[in-house]
Image (spheres, grey):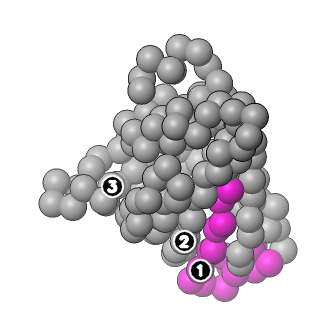
Amino acid sequence: MKYKTQLIIDSPLHVVTELFAEGDNEELWHSSMVSRQKNEFDANKSICLYEVNGRHVEVLVHFMNNNLPDTIDVEVYLLGMQLKISHKFVELDNGQTKWEINTEYTVDGLMLKLTMLLAPKMFISRVQLYMAEFKTFVMSDKNYSLI
């Protein structure tokens, strides 16, 4: 399954991407994140622990291409799923930033494939929540001191 989501953030591109690039900030804004452990041998890989629907889920995150402030590509592995996520940030004329996420899911197992086919909104809504939480974080004045 492939889909695209986008959101406008009322903040300049350099602020948005600097806050996004600092991975340690994610624990401050991502409500389901419990912890992040960076790979000591490869700085582009992390193991993240999330709490989703009362369950702890371990996720391997691999940053593939970091071309910020324009784009960053990530591969995520969890529970029989692989996600290829491409983030694109575009500076708008009015000091705002457009954030686009293109997501491609690859799943193992019949149940996950059926769930994706019958309830795609369940997957899309998780990305929309992720984006909304980050937007709220960026818009909070106190977080400008982090950059």
Query: Which x, y percent locates residue 105?
Result: 62, 74
Q: Which residues are magenta?
A: 100-117
- Asked which secondary structure carries label 2, the reply is strand
Tell me the kind of residue under disc 2: Lys
The answer to whether residue 132 is seen in the rendering is no
CA–CA distance in space, label 1 to label 2: 8 Å
Which residue matches tag 3? Answer: 46
- Asked which secondary structure carries label 3, the reply is strand
Query: Which x, y percent locates residue 55?
Result: 54, 48
Residue reaching furthest left? 41
| Residue 79 part of the magenta segment | no
Dot 3, how many residues are within 10 Å of its Cα: few (below 14), some (14-19), or many (20+)?
Answer: some
Using residue 11 as the reference point, say whether residue 34 is left or right of it: left
What's the residue at 53%, 55% (across, down)?
70
Instruction: State if disc 2 and disc 1 touch (CB < 8 Å).
Output: yes
Specify which label sits upstream in the sequence, 3 or 1: 3
Tell me the kind of residue under disc 1: Thr
Using residue 9 as the reference point, say whether residue 118 is left or right of it: right
Q: Quadrant of the C terminus?
A: top left
Which residue matches tag 1? Answer: 106
Specify which label sits upstream in the sequence, 1 or 2: 2
CA–CA distance in space, label 3 to label 1: 20 Å
Query: Which x, y percent locates residue 127?
Result: 67, 53
Disc number for residue 84: 2
Residue reaching furthest front? 93
Query: Which x, y percent locates residue 12?
Result: 61, 34
| Quadrant in which residue 112 is drawn | bottom right
Dot 1, how many residues are within 10 Å of its Cα: few (below 14), some (14-19), or many (20+)?
Answer: some
Residue reaching furthest top? 142
What's the residue at 65%, 31% (across, down)?
11
